[in-house]
Image (spheres, grey):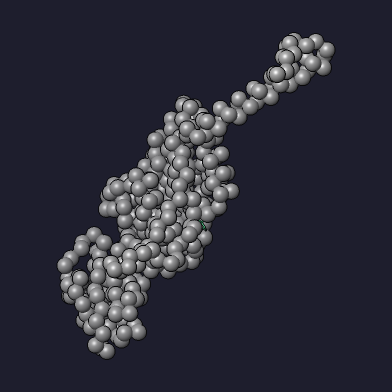
Amino acid sequence: MPEKNGPLQSNWFAERQALTRAGDLVLLLTADLKRYVIKLTPGRDMHTHQGVFAHDELIGQPYGGAVVSQLGSQALLLEPSLTDLIKHLKRGTQIIYPKDAAYLVHKLNLRAGSTVVEAGTGSGGLTTALAWAVAPTGRVFTYETREHNYQLARNNLDRVALLPYVEMHLRDIEEGFLQQEADALMLDVREPWRYLEQVRGALRTGGFFASLTPTVNQVIALLEGLEANGFADIGVEEVLVRGYKPVPERLRPEDEMVAHTGYLVSARLIDASLDPKQWLSKERRRYQARVEAQARMAEAEAARAAERQAGGRKYPKLPLPG
Ligand SMILES: C[S@@+](CC[C@H](N)C(=O)[O-])C[C@H]1O[C@@H](n2cnc3c(N)ncnc32)[C@H](O)[C@@H]1O
């Protein structure tokens, strides 16, 4: 019998079928609305509060149909979504939430065939979403310093059959990335601004950069770093998703929501011969213009004060109104 989290027998990700096969990952949605993501393994049982489901009886069943436990309770047999996979992976670190992962895939402009570099791997939550987007012809190159996390993420990716699309590195990105000319690069580390030189070495000119950090202080440091390191088209965003209670007669938002996960900073690497200052955001330009105007006014005021002190009154005193 295959070991619990061992390699899949079926190429579940690449070949979707109408009927379940041994080795498939399936979502079992039980009558009490609990969600179980399980790998169908001959001879194994799935124990739930709604009774035991024998894997043998789940194999060869149509996706979208119902199966019955030994207690007679029905459960839906479904294909797990990417969100199900991310929520069910084993965690050793904080993982990127599906709402952020989904938008990151968009901001990094990923599609089948893209190459994307990522650090740190953590539990492989974001790696799962990145591999999902770039497979089958693209690749994710992911970096992690902690061996425990590296192994955990490896197992998580293997379980969901996405490992073939990922190259994992147990390496500190301080030493640089081993790739060049990547289409996109994503940093989920505490001090992303410390690695921008390494990012420049790995990303192609025009490539997409993004980072997710939980505090405003980190965003400020990263913005300053990006401006100083040849990045343009810089943006800061936050993704808020509000769920609704799906009751047609009384449709209203859920009472609680995930209020904060992180700030998403995105940018594009531009040609080294260009001056990134020319490509600052409208708001940044306006702010800089104001600071420069204030500096000019302060300079003029200082010059006037110096003249007054020197005794000469260059400017005539204006008569008071009235
Ligand atoms: C917040 S976790 C990443 C979570 C991941 N995005 C996920 O969704 O599962 C940050 C990870 O970055 C790793 N890390 C921190 N600094 C690093 C560095 N300089 N090089 C490589 N990995 C690093 C940490 O060990 C940690 O596992």
Residue at 29%, 71% (x, y): give it.
Answer: 27
| Residue 202 visible in the snapshot | no
Horizontal side, residue 285 vs residue 8: left or right: right
Task: Pick the quarter of the image with the N terminus.
Answer: bottom left
Q: Position of residue 144 (x, y in %)?
A: 48, 56
Q: For the C terminus, give its image quadrant.
A: top right
Q: Residue at x 24, y 70 (%)?
A: 78
Name above or below for residue 10 compared with residue 316. below
Single out the residue that lies furthest toward the bottom: 71
In the rendered view, does 128 fall on the left or right side of 198?
Answer: left
Q: Is residue 303 left or right of residue 237?
A: right
98 or 112, which is in the foreground? 98
Q: Position of residue 278 (x, y in %)?
A: 48, 27
Residue 205 image point, x, y percent: 40, 34
Q: Position of residue 42 (x, y in %)?
A: 25, 79
At 56% from the left and 49% from the top, the residue drawn is 216
Q: Residue at x 54, y 46 (%)?
A: 219
Quadrant in the rendering for residue 256: bottom left
Taking 95 as reference, is 211 above or below it? above
